[in-house]
Amino acid sequence: MSFFSGKVVIVTGSSNGIGRGTAVLFAKQGAKVTITGRNAAALEETKKQCLQAGANAEGIFELIGDITSESFNGQLISATVEKFGKLDVLVNNAGAGDIEAFSTKVEDMPVSGFDKMMEINVKPVIRLSQLAVPYLEKTKGAIVNVSSIAANLVVNPLAYYAASKSALDQITVQLAGSLIKRGIRVNSVNPGPVVTNFAVNAGASEEVSAKLWEDMA
């Protein structure tokens, strides 16, 4: 029997990169997985890779939507439980950098950019975790927040992104301390440089993207 056989997992931001790899690995280990993102074609590719890894088609549930939408957050949790009957693991992976940061000096960066990073990288994690708690308490499940090594580094030109990941780490600590009493584990994963489309999706050129990975390595 595979390690996650019979478990139900949600992976946000699973249409590419770390999220896709996470979803595929859970599927390979026997879990039923809800995959979600904004790009239908990319999400379909994730599903394809999950099936190639050995998943049953009925065990992969696709939901297209934006995690910054509170109504979609509610739909994501409720639809998963309706589909599979429970929830064991919530992986809060979805996140983004800021396109403006790649062409703006730090002293000229608008404060609105900070608000944007919090809206994308922190608030959805809080809301989804809150919505998942009643179901995770029943299964003695887990929340995994995908943060970044950037939370503890100087990462020009992504100051606001780094700050949002620092905030996410503190949210993880506070949730972990509160929810362990109810049998729910909360942990953070802080990856170092992982070559994905992250920087390009945030607005960087291929050259700037390559330099960013070099500086972080």
Image: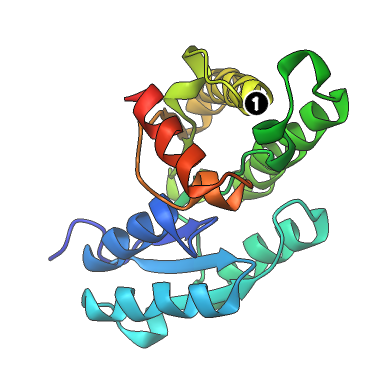
Query: Would residue 122 be seen by someone viewing this image from the given angle?
Result: no
Front-most of residues 105 and 176: 105
- Indicate left or right for 31 with 146 as reference: left
Residue 65: quarter of image: bottom right
Front-most of residues 197 and 210: 210
Residue in the image at 57% along x and 49% along y: 94
Q: Position of residue 59 (x, y in %)?
A: 39, 78
The N terminus, quarter of image = bottom left
- Indicate left or right for 143 with 78 as reference: left
Front-most of residues 172 and 147: 147
Give the amino acid type for the residue marked by disc 1 in the picture: Ser
Q: Is residue 33 above or below residue 198?
A: below
Circle count = 1
Q: Where is residue 196 in the image (x, y as percent from the top left)?
A: 41, 50
Q: Position of residue 181 (x, y in %)?
A: 51, 24
The C terminus, quarter of image = top left
- Indicate left or right for 134 with 44 as reference: right
Q: What element carries label 1?
A: helix
Q: Mark 1 points at which residue?
A: 164
**Label 1, residues with CA under 10 Å away: few <14, some 14-19, many ≥20:** many
Residue in the image at 58% along x and 19% along y: 166
Residue in the image at 48% along x and 13% along y: 152
Residue 50: quarter of image: bottom left
Residue in the image at 19% along x and 56% along y: 3
